Amino acid sequence: MRSYILLAAARALLPVTVLFAIYMLLRGHNEPGGGFIAGLVTTAAIIIEGLAFGVAHTVRRLGRILTAFLVIGLGLAVLAGLIAVAAGDPFLTNYHWHMPLPGDGYVHLSTTLIFDIGVYLAVIASTTVAIGVFAGGEEETP
Amino acid sequence: MLLTLAVIIGIPFLIGGLALVIPRPWNGWLALLAPATVIALGLPLWMEVGGGGEILVPLSWFPDLGLTADLFVNRLGAFFVMLIGIIGLGIVQYSRYYLKEDATGWFWFLLLSFMGSMLGIVLADSLLLLFVFWELTTITSFLLIGIDFGKEEGRKGALQAFLVTGVGGLALLVGIVLLGQLAGTYNLTELYAMSGEIVADPRHTIPLILIFLGAFTKSAQFPFHFWLPGAMAAPAPISAYLHSATMVKAGVFLLGRMFPIFSEAAIWLPTLATIGLITFLVAGWNAVKSSDLKQLLAHSTVAYLGVLTALYGFYARVGLEGELVNILNHALYKSSLFLLIGWMEKAMGSRDLAILEKERWIGREKLGATLIGIGAFAMIGMPFLLGFMAKDTFFYAVAEGPIEGLTLALVITVLASTLAVIYALKLWAGVFFGSEEPPTGRGYPRNKISIWLLVVPALLLLPQVVGGVIPAWYLGQVVEPGTTWQGVAFWQYLDVKLVITLAMLVAGYFGYRHWRAIAATPFLSKLPSVQRGGEGLVSGTLAHASSLSRMLQLGGHPRYGSIILLVAIAVVIGGVAFSGRTLFDHGLVWGPNPEFAWFPALVVAIAAVFTVTLRKRIPKAVMMAVVGYGMAVFYVFFRAPDLALTQLLVETVSVILLLLIFRRMPELGDDIRSVRRRVVHGVVAVVVGLTMGALAWAAGSYHVAERAGYEQIRLALPIAEGRNVVNVILVDFRGMDTLGEIFVLGIAAFGAYALFRGRRHRPAGPEAEEVKR
């Protein structure tokens, strides 16, 4: 069964949701959010995409990126820890920088952010891969 | 200095990773860069510490646990860095021309990761860091040996090597931990300083024996020597690298690292000398029996490893003289011989002595045959080769000074050396003797075989010749700078060692003439074969493992679930019972008490009842989700927005997952369980539910002076610069846990993927049967 409402909504939903997820990810250090939650939000969006356009279609479009996310995510998380090792501190010691912006504001950058992005990507990849595995093999939604 | 060492260890891994994504001709070029960098950075290290002295680079790992990742370079370590680098460079260049299109990104990744792991072993100061790299070599060598996993031979050899070295690795870990507990430190440099105290404590024997086990399995010492010949299924360059300079040398290297600590230990000399010499003899005998030249080399490798092991025993008596010469000698001639046998297979179309000994290859393949001849001479220890010097130091170490059982050691040495002469001559026979004109067309045509297949072994044999012709300069200046090398060339040794050598050569020659008869001697050939015993051990282990899993994997999910839950509950109840307190010492306090908490509680309870009673899968899943969403409401009450958000999302995603799975499953239908089973399941559910509920309640009403959380709330902003404490804990305070968790997630996804793929694409035919087995 093909729902045109779902199709139309899904087309707009994925980018908006991913944007929202990234917002959740970035604010996570100070407000509710963070890599894990953002990852699950993105997964939900990808699932809606899959339900609307068919799993096979979604796997074809996103499968390679998502599996790459697993490696990249785990790699980023380890990298965030190794930065400290390179600087001579114990593994996973975190650093913070305040990059001043024009005016009064600043951007708070930290190695925890790299770590959280790693978590984000790893969560998306592992949940979508698991779901794709169970959803796959079915005939495509017509 | 930290940067140098980090680059030496890291660059092979880095380039190995890159080789996975870079297409074929280019990744081979790139791979050359790894050993080249190692050599370029290792040479200054060698210049600095080759004559003695050491460099210690502190690096913290888990400071709270007193663990360090300190790196340490001394003469032995720097020597191995150069050895791994130089032979590695030769192997990479050879592989590019030998494997051609089989040299995939995966191959380079494994080979270079293996190289990096070896470098990690030789540069670690912390024994635990050494162990991590040790296990990495076990894994990468397993994958390298089995790189041709389509062949059963390759899989079997890899599995054997993995099981033997893996078990040894576990022994080593226990040994290291015991040693660390005994001495109070895991760092080699600190252990060296307190070797007197360690040896004076009689408890040092147990860790030492366990460490020996690690070294003996890795270095294929008797009775673990059976895995090495099995590992010969790998292509020539892999065998050459693993079994000359690296993998098996790791065990010898470990002995070298332990020498300064334990050389005074009572069991050091007798154990190493006995095991080493037995290995030398047994493996030599196996080599004499082999007709396949690669198998012959494999057995001879084991034999030489026996020599190196025994030498470390004897060094306790005569000092470390000749340590590096012997390791270098073997690495050079054995790697080049393995590579030459690879070439031989291509050029002559066979490596079977029964065929090759009839044919006179020297006429056609002059360069290759000569090189094999030089290699075989180095194996015997003929004059004007480094092998001569190496053999001389060995005889010196065995014959010098009185020890108990010396005569026996000497007899075994002479006997085993005679065997070495026999199998070296067999190698000769393959190319030099024989009368028939070699056939054309059995191997590859000459223009299809790259000249690099001969140039690389030739370059590796060059130091053999240089070391033999000008030994004083070569050994004193290059190999062991700072030492004055006793003796200049072979003619100085007009003593008992020369007599031994001559006797050995003559006996060896006659032995060679009649090797088939000797190998077939009824008495000797009936000796119980450790080879077969070892293979039986491995297959027995596998059979035991599968019968054990059949025993544990009985019944369906209700049983597994019950067992897991009941064990968890038993632990909780047991813990409370033994603590001498009850769960409600602090009274039955209801935490924050919003008036309207009864509403979500009611919803959760009703949904829970429906989850159990409904007889359709999908409504069940939806009701379970309602329970979950109800829980999220409680998180909101407790002012935990992060938990609430996570709970909602997890619930949503898992409902979808369940729905996807349920689409593939049959309808539930009526409950067909017997009354007894229903009662049992009900009891389990009620007990588990009540216990967990009581535990949660008790945790909520338990007030301590300062909760663990307050500390983290207090520190979140000043230390981690974050106001969301949950996130700060996840990514900063407990970052290591999170890292572990996402790895578990990744592995779980990988597992689901592999299981599902495995079900869909089960291979057909006889191969499938084999896989199942």
Image (cartoon, coloured by chain):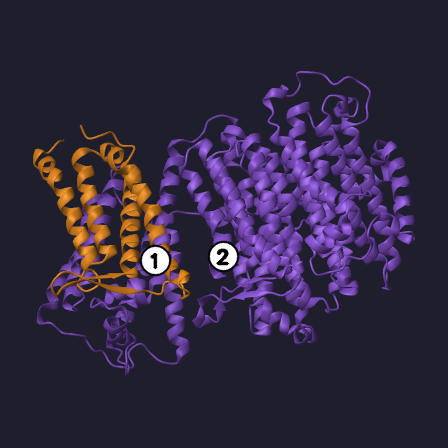
Chain colours: A orange, B purple
Q: Which mark is residue B125?
A: none
Q: Which chain is home to disc 2?
A: B
Q: x, y (%) of residue B174?
A: 58, 63
Q: x, y (%) of residue B505?
A: 88, 41
Does residue B350 appear left or right of residue A43 in this picture?
right
Does residue B199 appear left or right of residue B30 in this picture?
right
Is residue B689 visible in the rendered image? The answer is: no
Residue ID at (53%, 47%) = B114
Choose mark 1 or mark 2, whichever is in front: 2
Q: According to the image, label 2 marks what residue? A: B4
Please name the amino acid that badge 2 sits on: Thr
**Would you place residue B574 above or below residue B34 in this image?**
below
Does residue B414 appear left or right of residue A125 in this picture?
right
Q: Which chain is home to disc 1?
A: A
Q: Residue furthest left?
A: A5
Residue ID at (16%, 74%) = B592
Q: Nearer the viewer, residue B212 or B89?
A: B89
Spatial CA span between label 1 and label 2? 21 Å
Cβ–Cβ under 8 Å for marks 1 and 2? no
Is residue A96 visible in the rendered image? The answer is: yes
Give the SS element for disc 2. Answer: helix
Give the SS element for disc 1. Answer: helix
Q: Nearer the viewer, residue B263 or B474?
A: B474
Q: Nearer the viewer, residue B554 or B302?
A: B302
Please name the amino acid that badge 1 sits on: Ala
Does residue A127 appear left or right of residue B382 in this picture?
left
**Would you place residue B450 above or below residue B571 in this image?**
above
Q: x, y (%) of residue B105?
A: 46, 37
* Residue B506: quadrant of the picture: top right
Q: Residues within 10 Å of mark 1 (few under 14, many from 20)?
A: many
Q: According to the image, label 1 marks what residue? A: A80
Q: x, y (%) of residue B320?
A: 73, 61
